[in-house]
Image: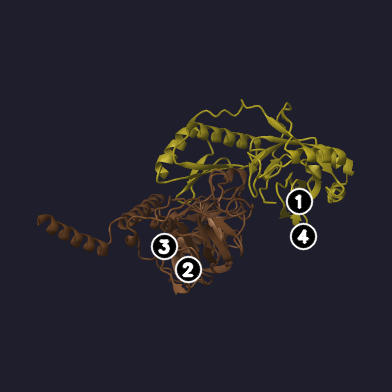
Amino acid sequence: MGIRILKGGMLTTVQDLGRYGYQSQGFSVAGVMDVRSFKIANLLIDNPENEAVLEFTLIGPTLEFTSDTIIAITGGDFTATINGKPADMYTAIYMKKGDILKFGSARTGTRGYIAFSSYLQIPTVMGSRCTNLKSGIGGFKGRKLKEGDYINFRIKRRYLPFFLSRKLTPDNFEQDSATLRVVLGPQDKMFTKQGIHTFLNEEYTVTGDFDRMGCRLEGPFIASAGTSDIISDGIAYGAIQVPSHGKPIVLLSDRQTTGGYPKIGAVIYADIPKLVQRKTDHKIRFEAVTIEEAQKIYHEEILELEAMRKAIHVPCKEVLEIRLAAKRLNKLFDEQ
Amino acid sequence: MEDVKILTEGDTSILIAFKQEISPEVNAKIAATVKLIRQQQTPGIVDVIPTYASLLINYNPQVISYGQLKRRLTALLKMDLDTESSARRVFEIPVCYGGEYGPDLHTIAEHAGLSEEEVIRIHSSTEYLIYMLGFLPGFCYLGGLDERIHTPRLANPRKAIPAGSVGIGGSQTGIYPMESPGGWQLMGKTPVRTYDPDREVPILVYAGEYIHFYPVDEDEFNRIKAAVDDGTYEVTIREGSAPDTADGGEKNGKEA
């Protein structure tokens, strides 16, 4: 019981929130690129927050289900079909043994996610099931999925309460631009006032040099105050390096653990999904927020996800009406 | 502590920047600070990443806010650091120098104007401080390479360098923990695995410890390699005796 990969797509990997605690030993954190879409996929089917999913990029995979299970699809629109019929996103879907789930290329966004209620049978390596492609560890044999691969499920879990209520409004991936909020630092002092002004007021363009490690942007030169190298230090999620060429590079899930270029700032956690769903030539602007504002936004997103969880844990209207009618009928019979 | 700054790096990381220089003294302070942070078990800290002169801390803002963490770290940095007590742990790493194991040994010797034997003697007579790990799992940034054998990187990096290769890149020396592209001049190879994903603890050595290379011949290399493959080899770890003479001569943290 599990899934067979009929087509691997461009880059389909097993991911979760990443392998934390080993960055000091040279291991990249890895993990999903779009944390928000990942969390919503798991939330829709009552999975633990950090349950492993499939992440696919630009061209999605084709999967055959060898047993019944429940899934949820989130992220960009890859025109998913089940046995040739359009599949809904941001909802719980009951999959039957033999069903074929097929994704095309990304119509909107760049990354999509599938969560499974029966959990993927992937061994935990150093506390995580995520694939670290560079080190070749974790996930499915440390690599991307390809035709013929087979992943078992860990458990049988084919029932969810409030099944018909499990529907959320999909996030919008149509935009071709994004404003990313950043906290300046730690090396913003190495840039001139003019350099900071350029960074916060000019428009940057997503280049083709964009992978799980990071995203290079093209645009106006960000002037540094003097030397353009630092003594190598650790790199945070979303950190924005500006080497001597003056163009920003945003570092993402597969970022190297340490680096020697100054970091003008870092994209806040809640805004990284906006960047990772953009395509080549999309436009990016940066807006500075204080650390306190950034962490307020961080909490607000957690509350928003909590509200989503609540919204799908109530009987849906249609079911509720039938239940009320049944209750009234019962009452009538009882009175007789 | 003087020269120490606490800086933001996004909303889920904080950077403690010490005096920005590559020196054993600064590195020892960082190691002692890491120890203190681990001892205090501050909730919300998910990762502590020491480097040459800084300490990056990843944390969960849902558990601890920037303000709270900064206050805790400020207090912690005022505590007396225990930089003296820990004995120097030196890992003895056998290296088969030259030949097919170290195809660039003659280049290094030529560049230094020394014989290959002299280069090996110099390379294997220092206890190298591990300043930090990074770049690849288990990749050590070592300090203290003798200036006489500093050698520029290859003009054309190799596409695949075998795991265990020992090389020199500019003012740095080190071991490739896994097969990787790279531009260092290869002088030899060790059968010891500094990174082994199938081992219970995949990483062999950590920041703050020392590495000492010693030459072995091909027969000894093969004997050790067989024992490593069987899982029966244990690296000799001894307590360093020499006074700290590392001068922190190399100044660049460039990647391999």
A193 relative to B229 in the view: left or right: left
The residue singled out by tag 2 in the image is: A109
Of the numbered discs 2 and 3, the one sitting upstream in the chain is: 3
Secondary structure beneath dot 4 equals: loop
The chain to which mark 2 is attached is A
Q: Residue at x 63, y 39 (%)?
A: B200
The percent coordinates of residue B199 (x first, y second) are: 66, 41
Kindly check if marks 1 and 4 are in contact, taking CB atoms under 8 A apart as contact: no
Secondary structure beneath dot 2 equals: loop
The chain to which mark 3 is attached is A
The residue singled out by tag 1 in the image is: B162
The residue type indicated by label 2 comes to: Gly
The residue type indicated by label 3 comes to: Tyr
The chain to which mark 4 is attached is B
The residue singled out by tag 4 in the image is: B156
Kindly check if marks 3 and 4 are in contact, taking CB atoms under 8 A apart as contact: no
Chain B, colour shown:
yellow
Chain A, colour shown:
brown
Rounded to the nearest angstrom, the CA distance separating label 1 from label 4 is 16 Å
Rounded to the nearest angstrom, the CA distance separating label 1 from label 3 is 48 Å
Task: Give the residue furthest to the left.
Answer: A336
The residue type indicated by label 1 comes to: Pro
The residue type indicated by label 4 comes to: Asn
The residue singled out by tag 3 in the image is: A94
Q: Residues within 10 Å of mark 3 (few under 14, many from 20)?
A: some
The percent coordinates of residue B256 (x first, y second) are: 70, 51
Rounded to the nearest angstrom, the CA distance separating label 1 from label 2 is 39 Å
A25 relative to A91 in the view: left or right: right
User: How many circles with numbers are drawn on the protein?
Assistant: 4
